[in-house]
Structure formats: structure tokens, C-alpha cells
């Protein structure tokens, strides 16, 4: 089951310490991604590619601890369905008290709501995602193809 957030049903605030990154951030994000994979002990992962950081309809959202980039999300904006797909999130877990996974979800929900999008797709459903405002199960393949 896949899930999405209906943005009009949310009331989150944007996080104060994030930026939309450019393609020059790829190397640092790749390091963060490798740290994330090691920390989570993932055996089967999807690679990230430099070109993902250059696609015009993608946002690379960087999260900072003080002045250090420590996490990022790759998100794709689809105007044809007025929705955003959160493709990849990773952080290095050096400062676990930041809870950046939760912060990133809420920040991106607030960001894309402010930008006028209808839905924020989060991939496979999970318990922590189901606690987000506006959460719903979605069969996006059927919805997007109609």
C-alpha cells in the first residue's frame, strides 16, 4: 500500500534550517546517503545519481545542523497531477535528537502546501507516516492514469 498526504488537511510549519540545494550538493548528499545506508544496515538500496540533482522538476531539500548539511530529500514535482513525490530521504544520524525524518516530512508538507500542491506522496505506507496530518492510502497508479 502506498500513501499520500492531502495537503489541504494539514497545518504544519516550515522548518527554519533547510534550503533548496543545487546540483553542486551532489557529492555531499552522496556521503550522507552512504552514512544513512550504513546506519540503517540496508543491504539492497537504490543508487542516487548526479542527474537527479539536475532535473528541472526536482527539488533537493537540504537540512542543516548549525551550518552543516546533514540530511536531504529528493522530491519530484508533477504539475500534470499537481502533486509531489518524495523519492528519497537520507540523513547521517550524527545528532539523533534532531529527529530529521519527522522534521523533513512535516517541513515538506508545509512547503508544498504553501506552493499550492494538492498531494505529497510518501511511497509505501508505514506506521510513522500514518500519524501525519492529511494521511491517506492511495492507489496512485490508478489515480494518475485516469
Image (cartoon, helix red, strand yellow):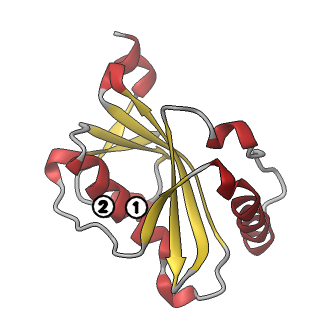
- Decide which of tag 2 and tag 1 comes sooner along the chain: 1
Secondary structure under the numbered disc 2 in the rendered image: loop
Q: Which mark is residue 132?
A: 2
Q: Nearer the viewer, mark 2 or mark 1?
A: 1
Placement of 53 over or under 15, stated as above or below? above
Which quadrant holds residue 107?
bottom left
Residue 133: x percent and y percent? 23, 58
Residue 125: x percent and y percent? 46, 49
Number of other residues with Cα within 10 Å of mark 2, as a class: few under 14, some 14 to 19, many 20 or more: some
Secondary structure under the numbered disc 1 in the rendered image: helix
Point 79% across, 64% down: residue = 34
Residue 39: x percent and y percent? 75, 75
Mark 2 in CB contact with mark 1 (< 8 angstroms): yes
| 92 to the left or right of 98 | right
> Which residue is disc 1 drawn over?
105
User: Which of the image's four quarters has the C terminus?
Assistant: top left
Amino acid at each position: 500500500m502506498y500513501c499520500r498526504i492531502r495537503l489541504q488537511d494539514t497545518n504544519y510549519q516550515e522548518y527554519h534550517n533547510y534550503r533548496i540545494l543545487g546540483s553542486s550538493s551532489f557529492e555531499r548528499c552522496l556521503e550522507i546517503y552512504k552514512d544513512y545506508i550504513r546506519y540503517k544496515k540496508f543491504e539492497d538500496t537504490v543508487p542516487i545519481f548526479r542527474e537527479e540533482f539536475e532535473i528541472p522538476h526536482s527539488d533537493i531539500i537540504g537540512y542543516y545542523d548549525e551550518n552543516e548539511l546533514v540530511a536531504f530529500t529528493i522530491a519530484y514535482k508533477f504539475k500534470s497531477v499537481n502533486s509531489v513525490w518524495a523519492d528519497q530521504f537520507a540523513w547521517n544520524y550524527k545528532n539523533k535528537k534532531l529527529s530529521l525524518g519527522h522534521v523533513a516530512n512535516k517541513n515538506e508538507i508545509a512547503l508544498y502546501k504553501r506552493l499550492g500542491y494538492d498531494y505529497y506522496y510518501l511511497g509505501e505506507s508505514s506506521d510513522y507516516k500514518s500519524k501525519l496530518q492529511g494521511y491517506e492510502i492511495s492507489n496512485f497508479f490508478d489515480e494518475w492514469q485516469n
